Image: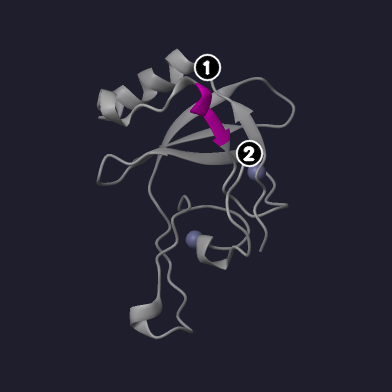
Amino acid sequence: MYLCNDTRRLPYVELLTAMRDTGAKESDYPRLYDSVGCCELGRGHGDQHAAHKFAPGADPELWVEWDDDSDEIRYVRVTVCVAEDETLPRLERTACTLPTDHGCGHSWEARDLPHR
Ligand SMILES: [Zn+2]
Ligand SMILES: [Zn+2]
């Protein structure tokens, strides 16, 4: 699969507030120019775009969601899919890093890298 890579600029104060509320420290905060969401789902996923923003070290993680036709940005806490590629030997598997109910393929099916 290829990644959606749709990007959305995130209001800085809202982003930092959502991160702080999820347990982020100041050292975890992104730079102002880095306050962007870049959709990590597979191209053609439907529904809302989604980008990972902060992992407090345990579930749930902080993700940001947005739609094509709206300025609204939603900060959500999600658990992660963690499905593995069962066709690979156990040591070569990596767990899927996308939200549990994601559309399209798992993160390890991506054929390109996130970019913005
Ligand atoms: Zn997307
Ligand atoms: Zn998955």
**Measured along the vertical axis of the image, is residue 110 above or below residue 41?**
below
Amino acid bearing label 2: Gln
Q: Which residue is mark 1?
A: 11
Q: Quadrant of ligand 1?
A: top right
Residue 30 in the image: state x and y as whole percent: 41, 28
Mark 2 sits near ligand 1, with its Cβ under 8 Å away: yes
**Measured along the vertical axis of the image, is residue 39 above or below residue 97?**
above
Rendered residue at 30%/46% (across/down)? 59
Is 46 covered by the magenta stretch? no
Tag 1 secondary structure: loop
Residue 38 in the image: state x and y as whole percent: 58, 39
**Region rendered in magenta:** 33-37
Q: Residues within 10 Å of mark 2 (few under 14, many from 20)?
A: some
8 sits to left or right of 53: right
Q: How many marks?
A: 2
Residue 113 in the image: state x and y as whole percent: 58, 55
Amino acid bearing label 1: Pro
Q: Quadrant of the C terminus?
A: top right
Q: Nearer the viewer, residue 97 or 12?
A: 12
Q: Residues within 10 Å of mark 1 (few under 14, many from 20)?
A: few
Mark 1 sits near ligand 1, with its Cβ under 8 Å away: no
31 sits to left or right of 109: left
Rendered residue at 44%/33% (across/down)? 76
Q: How is the image coloured?
A: one colour
Tag 2 secondary structure: loop
| Distance in Å between CA atoms under marks 2 and 1 | 18 Å
Residue 48 circle label = 2
Residue 81 in the image: state x and y as whole percent: 43, 58
Q: Nearer the viewer, mark 2 or mark 1?
A: 1
